[in-house]
Amino acid sequence: MLKYQTPTGMHDLFQKDLEQVAKIEQLAKKMADFYGFEKIETPILEFSEIFEKGTGGSTDIVEKEMYSLKTKGGDLLTLRPEITPGVVRAYSQAGMQNLPKPVRLWYLGPCFRHERPQAGRYRQFNQLGFESLGTPHPIIDTITILIFYNLLKSLGFKKLIVEVSCIGDGQCRGAFKKALTNYFRSKVSSLCADCRNRLKRNPLRVLDCKEEKCCVVKKNAPQVLDYLCKDCSDHFKSLLEFLEELEIPYSINPYLVRGLDYYTRTVFEIIEDTEEGKVQGSLAGGGRYDGLVKLLGGKDTPACGGAMGVERVINLIKAKNKQAEKEKQTCEVYLTQVGELAKKKALKLFEQLRQANIKAGEGLHKESLSAQLGAADAMKAKYSLIIGQKEALSNQVIIREMKNGRQKVVDIDKVIKELKNKI
């Protein structure tokens, strides 16, 4: 076992991963430019209170997952577990409330959560997000959903469904919380230990639990949609009408609350309608947070946003592409050789193939002909070019069709012309 490895839950990003990150950022920038979002980068470290007050003291993020430290000066700081509270802090600190509304900001950067590592979840991960501050209209919620829906479509996800709900606001959530608390108290013995604790502090968190026995209990719990005030109900109805107009497939999930305390009214998650998508959880999610700016010391400001975990999406893309990669033809021809003279002839021919724009693979560093032919088969090459000692001395090449094994001997200076006729 190696002495030094990445810490638990951390991971390296290699060339192919970084290419996917760059692709996602490029697509996000196109979306941002079209819809008028400006990029923002907030510090990786923020005062811990921003997350304790904003994200919510009863959330798993604050209770279990934050990486916090005390500086030499006595400040309590936290590696950001999410970016929305930092954006809200920057919005107020920079005086952006005086700008024309909505103020639209987007970001992509690392976040840190001390949670149990699993497929698609890391303790350091990149988060992509879009935030709109200053407008209460449900069309802002719709555009937020639309951006992530189109972004995921552009990344190759096909059967996307938007799970959506409305969790009310300060006017109507009190009655729902009371009904929910009464219901769960009657079933408290069937809840997990965490949910029994959540019930005392914020019963909505129980709805977010993924434990099997809690999922069974919540199936018959009161539904928030039955407790909405007129304003929240009208807001939700308008959102659904906008989604229908855009022909975005959606499913109303009355038990969707998301894992953060600051949400009001709209909450959403985007999933893919496949088994592997459900294993990985949501691809993107978010909602409206009309009280967060004021909660963190700013002016009363309606806002809406969403985010997605970049690594989770990349892992799903890699899984989708795994089979396609196996079947993908990576070269038209594969150049094989045996012996030093053949290697010299093959090297020159390989350069001629490049100049002729013929996509070619090679085994110039290999000695075994069978190993080279195996590599040609793995790369799905249509033809292998074989130069043995005999062919090298006579300036000839064997062109073998990989599919059926038929082969033809051709003068080396006629190989390019022969291949162009075949390809």
Image (cartoon, rainbow, N blue to C red):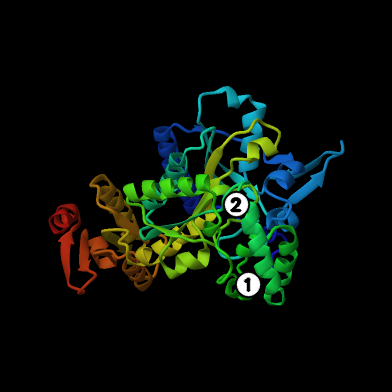
Q: Could you tell me if residue 205 is visible in this image?
A: no
Give whichever of 43, 97 is nearer the camera. 97
Residue 118's disc number: none
In the rendered image, the quadrant that contains the N terminus is bottom right
Name the side, left or right, on which 140 lies relative to 110.
left
Residue for badge 2: 125
Mark nearest the camera among 1 and 2 is 1
Residue at x 31% of width, y 63% of height: 336
Q: Residue 32 appears at what percent x and percent y?
A: 44, 36
The spot of residue 331 in percent (x, y) is 30, 58
Which residue is located at x 59 percent, y 60 percent? 121
Give the residue type that dot 1 points to.
Cys
Q: Is residue 54 above or below residue 62?
A: above
Alpha carbon separation for disc pair 1 and 2: 28 Å
State whether residue 421 is above or below residue 197: above
Occupied quadrant, residue 392: bottom left
Of labels 1 and 2, earlier in sequence is 2
Q: Nearer the viewer, residue 265 or 398?
A: 265
